[in-house]
Image: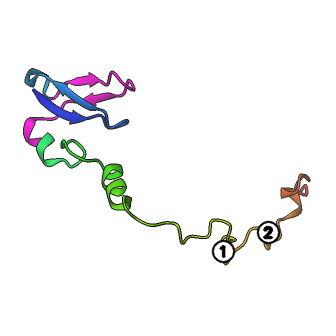
Amino acid sequence: MIDFKCQRCRQQLSVPDSLVGQQEQCPHCGKTNIVPSQDQAAKNPLTRKGPTSLDTISSWLQGTDFSSLDLNAPAAKKKNDSAARQRPAHHKGKKPPQT
């Protein structure tokens, strides 16, 4: 059996070795994937079994104390604040001048 992850939804798929190089549809999202060889699946970090990036981030955040964060603090303003920029008249619902 070859184990790999769907390219779209990252669902773990397991198919017989006889399907190497053939198209296999993910039962979860419907994406058609080409079944990798055992070597390709082992080398590709997206197809390896084990924790995903989200799992890794989640494990890093466990035990982190966020109580000191002020959730009501105003967000930092960007240098190019869109409210400060003037838009051309035709962007304000008016038609552009005819030429």
The residue wearing badge 1 is: 78
Quick one: 86 or 90, which is closer to the camera? 86
The residue depicted at 66 percent of the width and 74 percent of the height is 78
Question: Residue 14 at x, y = what percent?
Answer: 18, 27
The residue wearing badge 2 is: 83
Q: How is the image coloured?
A: rainbow
Q: Quadrant of the N terminus?
A: top left
Q: Quadrant of the C terminus?
A: bottom right
Label 1 sits on a secondary structure element that is: loop
- Quarter of the view holding residue 25: top left
Q: Residue 98: give its label.
A: none
Identity of the residue furthest to the bottom in this view: 79
Amino acid type shown at disc 2? Ala
Amino acid type shown at disc 1? Lys
Horizontal arrangement in the rendering, residue 82 relative to residue 47 (left or right): right
Quick one: 21 or 11, which is closer to the camera? 11
- How far apart are labels 2 and 1 at the CA level? 10 Å
- 8 vs 76: above or below: above
Horizontal arrangement in the rendering, residue 98 relative to residue 84 (left or right): right
Question: Residue 45 at x, y = what percent?
Answer: 21, 49
Residue 27 included in the magenta stretch of the image: yes
- 11 vs 54: above or below: above
Label 2 sits on a secondary structure element that is: loop
Indicate which disc, 2 or 1, sits on the residue closer to the N terminus.
1
Query: What residue span does the magenta drawing correspond to?
Result: 21-40
